[in-house]
Amino acid sequence: MKKTTLLKVLVVYSSKIASSALLNKTENINPFALDSQRAGYAQSYAYFLDECKKQNLQAALSTSDDIIGSGTCKSFWTHDKEGWNKVKTPCFSANIFDKFSPTNLILKGKRELMFHNPLIKPFNNRNLYHLFFDKYETYTKLAKYAIPTVVIDSKVKNGISTALGKLSGLMGKASKRVDFESNFVLKDRNGAGGNRVYKITDKREKRIEQIIKRCPNNSFILQPMVKFERGFEYGGKEVRADIRLIFMGRKIVQTYVRIAAVNEFRCNDHQGGALHHLDIKNIPSVVIQMARKVERELPPHDSLYALDFIIGNSGRPYFLEGNTGPGLDWKMADKEEELKSKQLIRLIVRKMAERASGIKNEKRNGVGRETKINYLFS
């Protein structure tokens, strides 16, 4: 039986982005491919693991492909002053920093396996995670703050036509109907990062049907396109931007805006948006007020999460979505973004240290599937 390493903290990343330490490819020298858009994650998670070490937390990074049991992965990466290291033996932790979402049945099964034992703790509250993972569930709970939203049931005859009719009814009841264009936005119900988000203009039903057929394993929601090119000013200019507030529990810990690229309605940085950190005093008060109302309606938790907003041309703010996994990376040349990201990582690591101090693992007959482990939480 291979020896299992007991860890205080284990980062588990989606295998769509991170590579298993078991891979033997010569270019696989760190968890994140050097030639990918996510190459910068290697430096941010190296910093994460180094900060854990400063807190006397033995920590490592693994992937969703490596999950073999509750809190257990079959291989992992560590980091030290020499760089990244592969460890091709199992590891276990009850303290998981979860960075993978069940976007398909395989990942769903992996996530259920990882947290099958309720005493294996994800960093983010389970109820909050599930609320924000499903954009339609988010809308259902927080409809009075959000853009009118319907889910498209493609399995039902005339499902697209029915969804368009229902959305038209919701738009007609909106207090600021003037904020909505005649165009629509089709979104992956469980998507992230601005991926699988489409602007629907003409030939609506046919266009929506084509997209859904191309993505048979995805569920979609539909919203009206919001006019927001004049709702927010940055640097003395009206810009198309979304506003992100990052919370730890009930406290706002960071605020920034993401300005969309020219001729782009998506503001995500991975879609060409420009990120600018702002002091909270420079965030419009109507957004802060709405964020506080949203926060009070969320499940009880002590998690890191983000709330995203836009401001329509009428001046009314709209809640876009919540996110329990805001990015921790930074652009190499952006020193302010690096400082802010490192600040957020240190905050997370301190919270992980608090939680780890309340966990006692007692080993009996080795570690693995046959191990009995008692957990005591303070």
Image (cartoon, rainbow, N blue to C red):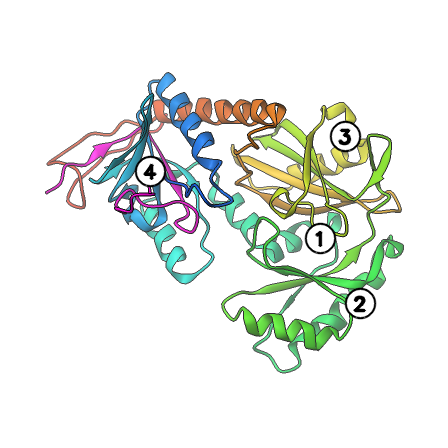
Instruction: Name which of mark 4 and mark 1 comes first in the sequence.
Output: 4
The numbered mark, 4 or 2, whose residue comes first in the sequence reads 4
Horizontal side of 126 relative to 193 (left or right) equals: left
Give percent across and percent down for residue 83. Answer: 34, 27
Residue at which label 4 appears: 29
Point 40% across, 45% down: residue: 18
Other-residue count near label 1 (Cα within 10 Å), few / some / many at <14 / 14–19 / ≥20: some
Q: Which mark is residue 169?
A: 2
Does 250 appear in magenta?
no
Q: Residue at x 84, y 44 (%)?
A: 316
Q: In 3D space, how far apart are the residues under numbered discs 4 and 1 (Cα atoms)? A: 46 Å
Label 4 sits on a secondary structure element that is: loop
Residue 94 occupies which quadrant of the picture? Answer: top left
Which residue is under mark 3?
A: 283
Q: Nearer the viewer, mark 1 or mark 3?
A: 3
Q: Main secondary structure of the magenta part?
A: loop
Label drawn at residue 143 = 1
